[in-house]
Image: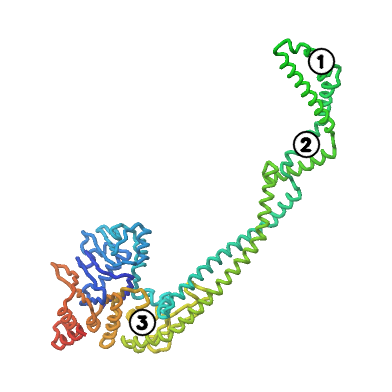
Amino acid sequence: MLHYLITLYICFVLKKLHIQNYAIIEEIEIDFSGQLNIITGETGAGKSILMGALSLILGDRADTSVLLNREKKCFVEGVFAVAGKKEVRNFLRENDLDTEEELVIRREISAAGKSRAFVNDTPVNLEQLRTLSTLLVDIHRQFDTLALGESDFQREVLDALAGHQELLSQYQDVFAQWQQHRNELQLLQQQKDQFTREYDYNKFLYDELEEAAFKENELEEAEAALQMLNNSEGIKMALSRVTYELNEGEQPMVQQLKTLINQLQPYNTYHAELPALLQRLQSVQVELKDIAGEVDTINEQVQYDPQRVEQLNDRISLGYKLLKKHGVQTTQELLDIQARLEEKLQAVLNIDEAIQQKENIVQQLLQQAEALADKLTANRTKQVKPLQDKVNKLLAQVGMPNARLRVDIAPHTALQPFGKDAVEFLFDANKSNRFEPVRKVASGGELSRLMLCIKSLVARSLDLPTLIFDEIDTGISGEAARQVGIIMKELAARRQVICITHQPQIAGKADAHYFVHKEIRGEAVKTGIRLLSQEERITAIAKMLSGEKPTAAALENAREMVMN
């Protein structure tokens, strides 16, 4: 009898298991049937060792203690059928692994204790192997937290029976949208908090610049104007002197040019270059006359204005203060800062509107999600009593007449990705009316049979292609064992089932019957396994019924089990 329970839910069909140099296994290779596979053998022959070897290719740690021959490496290889399984193909692509119709996982442990893992002949680390195994295998051992004791699995059972996958998908879509918009709302609120903390300071800076009311290039132009006013006396004196010399001096320049032109004019036709020279002199005279007029005009405009000087000094002083405060150099940079501050202030006003709009969306989505969640709850609740009644009936059939299952549904404090229901399977093994969570009170054998009963009810709806049961026959025999065999047979019509058993009633239902046996090779005991023929099956089952030397009645009984 094995000392632990293993229940594996292999998401894909396990086609082959090849083991070398593991524990007392020198080398064995098993080709599994796609239906009901039964493994029997005497106690200590190595049935549990098969499960230990399988766990290696699922990512369990190992050391040299598993080596039969410490001079050779240990080798375990499993071949899984994965055709059409998108999740596995995505994993393989993401990890640059070859995608094939078959998935070959190999684990090697050297004599030095070094472990290597391969997926389709490509090396992988244990973390990758464990991640992949979550897509391929859900493994549970006795006293571990079993899937049966996990709320997610329990809820999935009700969902499978309710058949509301479309409704659940619709809810999950709305729930995801609600979460997304709720997160966006939180970000907006955080932004508002930031804006609010900065608002008063930004408003002060903006008001200061707005009150200054600087125009484009004002400070630069004010500096130029101030320089002119501060030098107005000198400028006016210079302009007056120029005007005087051009027009009013003892010998005005304009008049002198006119005299020179008149002196040359009579000789204009006597030299080829004189006409051009006279034309240039006439142009200079006209230009000087225009200059004299402009100088006079400017001279009249230049006036020292103390009030204007004071105004300019005040604007420049204010400007320099603001330039220094904001760490910039030009009027345009100040205007740019003012524009940005205005945008920030406006954003405070705009974000309130954005928050309001987002709150409306979040509330609408929440109402939709809650309405859909209520429908999910109603559907699940409808399945509670039928599930309890059917499971309790099956429990009696498999040798647990006093066991009872109760399903409780309680609301979560907040919406979850699957709705608002917390599902709990409660178990009473002895009609004590004291129900406790199954993970706390059920034994390994009880959990196995309870799981078998549940799986038999939801197998058509849950994607659980392969079930492996070890020690499911603990504490049962006779009719109860036969009922377990019947349930397994029904499951195997739709799912691959592998079962290690000591019960002939279960073994008789096999589509493929494997016998684990001890072999004496030299001075060592080795484990072997072989697929039994029809007659060998009858003999093996007869021995399970009546001992090593089966009676004629036992053989006849075994034949009837195999044929039926």
Query: Is 103 situated left or right of 288 in this image?
Result: left
The residue where tag 3 is placed is 457
Query: Is 73 situated left or right of 300 in this image?
Result: left
In the image, which is nearer the foreground, mark 2 or mark 1? 1
Q: Position of residue 342 (x, y in %)?
A: 68, 53
Q: Which mark is residue 225?
A: 2
Q: Position of residue 477 (x, y in %)?
A: 26, 86
Of labels 2 and 1, earlier in sequence is 2
What quarter of the picture does the C terminus occupy? bottom left
The residue where tag 1 is placed is 259
The answer to the question of whether label 3 and label 2 lie on touching residues, with beta carbons closer than 8 A, is no
Spatial CA span between label 1 and label 3: 129 Å
Of labels 1 and 3, earlier in sequence is 1
Judging from the image, what secondary structure is the residue with disc 1 in?
helix
Please tell me which residue is depicted at 72% across the width and 53% down the height of the picture. 204
Of labels 3 and 2, earlier in sequence is 2
In the image, which is nearer the foreground, mark 3 or mark 2? 2
